[in-house]
Image: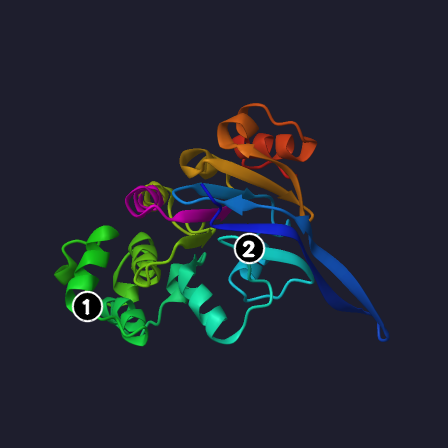
């Protein structure tokens, strides 16, 4: 089975001013190599500042890498632009950390799900497709939610609305950047179960970005551990969590069992 996406020595440097005259470079990613297959959830884990979100933003072309390559289905897409970039952006969608910030408070739930269908000139019955998407993410019955606004539903339901919105374009890859970190504990499992459902029913690949190893163990097949922009360990989730080899990974696991421990 071929990879959906893989990176080759992906590096990202940011320039910052040092004093009044100097400019210094900060390396956010350093020769990162990851891969994702269809019907798989891969975890990108690490503490704050490890480079997780920077990697996600490069994969969706919100940032441009300093060096390295990105391959989508074995095609080098590192320097694509124009129509090719627009086509790729339909294939890879991103779910952000804060569902409320991702939605327009002045528009209804139905509007949010309908909009990408209209923009992409969806050829089927739009109303049927909206119902299909809402049922898929368990916003049921759809008629109970369509006319509501984001502030009228729970945080977990808002995240479901946004997931339905990005699924409207039939992406092959979903990047979930800390998708449950702002939700109550009681709502997190529901959203994680939804990610598993999407993977199993649609066969898409999901990159799950988090600092929470407890949720990683619930949904991912493989994980990459990032530290200071470098992959320090990778492998099958159960193997990494039960037999970590890198000292930083061991510290992450210890911190997961002790929420007050700093690493």
Question: Circle 1 sits in a helix, a strand or a loop, which is it?
Answer: loop
Span colored in magenta: 194-211
User: Quick one: quadrant of the C terminus?
Assistant: top right
**Quick check: 113 left or right of 127?**
right
**Quick check: 222 left or right of 184?**
right
Q: Position of residue 202 (x, y in %)?
A: 30, 48
Per the image, the residue denoted by label 2 is 71
Residue plotted at (54% across, 65% down): 61
Q: CA distance from mark 2 to mark 1?
A: 31 Å
Q: Position of residue 252 (x, y in %)?
A: 60, 35
Nearest the viewer among 118 and 251 is 118
Q: Position of residue 83 (x, y in %)?
A: 46, 74
Question: Circle 2 sits in a helix, a strand or a loop, which is it?
Answer: strand
Residue plotted at (47% across, 38% down): 216
Q: Position of residue 68 (x, y in %)?
A: 67, 57
| Residue 205 magenta-highlighted | yes
Residue plotted at (28% across, 70% down): 117
**Circle on res. 124:** 1
């Amino acid at each position: 089975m071929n990879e959906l996406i893989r990176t080759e020595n992906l590096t990202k440097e940011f320039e910052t001013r040092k004093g009044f005259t100097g400019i210094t470079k900060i390396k956010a990613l350093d020769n990162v190599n990851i891969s994702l297959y269809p019907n798989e959830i891969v975890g990108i884990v690490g503490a704050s500042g490890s480079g997780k979100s920077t990697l996600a933003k490069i994969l969706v072309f919100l940032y441009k890498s300093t060096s390295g390559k990105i391959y989508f289905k074995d095609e080098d897409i590192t320097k694509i632009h124009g129509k090719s970039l627009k086509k790729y952006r339909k294939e890879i969608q991103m779910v952000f950390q804060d569902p409320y910030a991702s939605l327009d408070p002045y528009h209804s739930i139905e509007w949010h799900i309908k909009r990408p269908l209209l923009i992409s000139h969806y050829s089927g019955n739009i109303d049927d497709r909206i119902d299909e998407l809402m049922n898929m993410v368990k916003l049921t019955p759809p008629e109970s939610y369509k006319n509501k606004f984001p502030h009228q539903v729970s945080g977990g339901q808002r995240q479901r609305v946004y997931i339905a919105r990005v699924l409207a374009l039939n992406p092959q890859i979903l990047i979930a950047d800390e998708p449950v970190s702002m939700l109550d504990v009681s709502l997190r499992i529901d959203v994680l179960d939804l990610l598993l459902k999407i993977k199993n029913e649609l066969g898409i690949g999901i990159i799950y970005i988090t600092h929470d190893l407890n949720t990683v163990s619930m949904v991912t097949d493989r994980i990459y551990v990032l530290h200071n922009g470098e992959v320090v360990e990778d492998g099958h989730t159960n193997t990494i969590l039960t037999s970590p080899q890198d000292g930083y990974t061991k510290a992450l696991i210890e911190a997961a069992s002790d929420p007050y421990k700093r690493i």
